[in-house]
Amino acid sequence: MAPTTRPDDGERVLTALRRHLDGRREVVAGIDDRVDRLAGLLSDFVTDGGKRMRPRFALAGWTAATPDGAAVPDEVVTACAALELIQACALVHDDIVDASDTRRGRPTVHRTAEALHRDSRWDGDAERYGISQAILIGDLALTWADEMFVTSGVSPGALSRALVPWYAMKTEVLSGQMLDVLAEASGATDEVTPARVNRFKTAAYTVERPLHIGAELAGAGPETIAALREFGVAVGQAFQLRDDMLGVFGDPEVTGKPSGDDLREGKRTLLLARATTLSAKDDADFLLGVLGTEIDATRLDRARRILVDSGAVASIEAEIDTLTTRALHAVDTAAITDHGRENLRDLAAAATRRQA
């Protein structure tokens, strides 16, 4: 189920993104048409898919702090839409880190650039070229996100308030990503590390800070912001736990990623840590042994059985339910508008019950 705010908000976000991307590409085209074609990979990536979760949560933060029935101004939509460009940067770079071949059922940006090099019969190593260009395309997305946010047209006061969580969010997500990479390299098996990664790489960046940004754009009071942030942390953590489940059990036709991809990529998730704690030693050793390998269907099936039979899956599902309940309780307050509360409930359900 796709997250919802108001019926037209998703289209308004997409329109704002297209307008900004088109404007920036005019500048790039003035430098060189060949660079513009590379920038087109970013435009296609941003506009041809994705759930727009972060802009929607930011808009929900604004709605939760404004009178029921108030229309979201265009400049606020533009500011919130800029979050999608930060997400583009994160995903393009994440796919490089994970050596992923596909995203949303299509080749990743670095693989697309690699194929261009190979098909054109250029000099040098095609794989290195693809990675190099994808790093730069991700950097371009991050630069354009800042430009879009700052030039959105919101008032100076609103911009000044919202920049505080905007900058904090970028530091948090990069720190969480660095910890995630460290956990994989060091072979961490504890539950504290993946929980901390979930808190900052996902919860803060996906839900908490977007809500905070939207609320600051609306001039929300401290009680409203506190309630939204508490909601955001809980829903964001539940969102990542659901993502961990999909990374092992998800349908490739729905997720756009190969079945069992988290195991192939060596992801040190809370689901994995929980299973290694609850499983017999042989089963725990098997899970750790297949992690980060080209796991075949037979071994994937055994890994899934261990995750289920150990009780890890049931435990994570219970944790998702607990976090969702905590989130809904956090916004059951007069500090949140009625429409805002209803909207947040819909978003919580969409984030935690999704299949992709």
Image (cartoon, grey):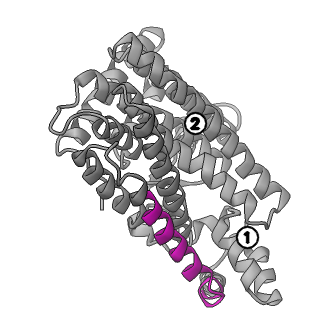
Give the residue at x 23% y 24%.
Answer: 74
Rendered-image quadrant of the N terminus: bottom left
Residue underneath mark 1? 291
Magenta: main secondary structure? helix
Q: Nearer the viewer, residue 330 or 112?
A: 330
Could you say which disc has been placed on residue 238 in the image? Answer: none
156 over 211 or under it: above or below: above
Q: Nearer the viewer, residue 51 or 169?
A: 169
| Residue 85 horizontal side relative to residue 110, left or right | left
Answer with mark 2 or mark 1, whichever residue precedes in sequence. Answer: 2
Q: Nearer the viewer, residue 115 or 262?
A: 262
In the rendering, at what x and y percent does residue 257 appear?
A: 49, 62
Is residue 112 in view from this perspective?
yes
27 over 236 or under it: above or below: above
Quarter of the image for residue 47 reads top left
Give the residue at x 21% y 35%.
Answer: 67
Is residue 133 in view from this perspective?
no
Label 1 environment density (alpha carbons within 10 Å; few <14, some 14–19, many ≥20): many
Magenta span includes 313: yes
Residue underneath mark 2? 117
In the rendering, at what x and y percent does residue 55 appear?
A: 37, 38
Quarter of the image for residue 12 reads top left
In the rendering, at what x and y percent does residue 25 appear?
A: 39, 19
> What range is drawn magenta here?
305-327
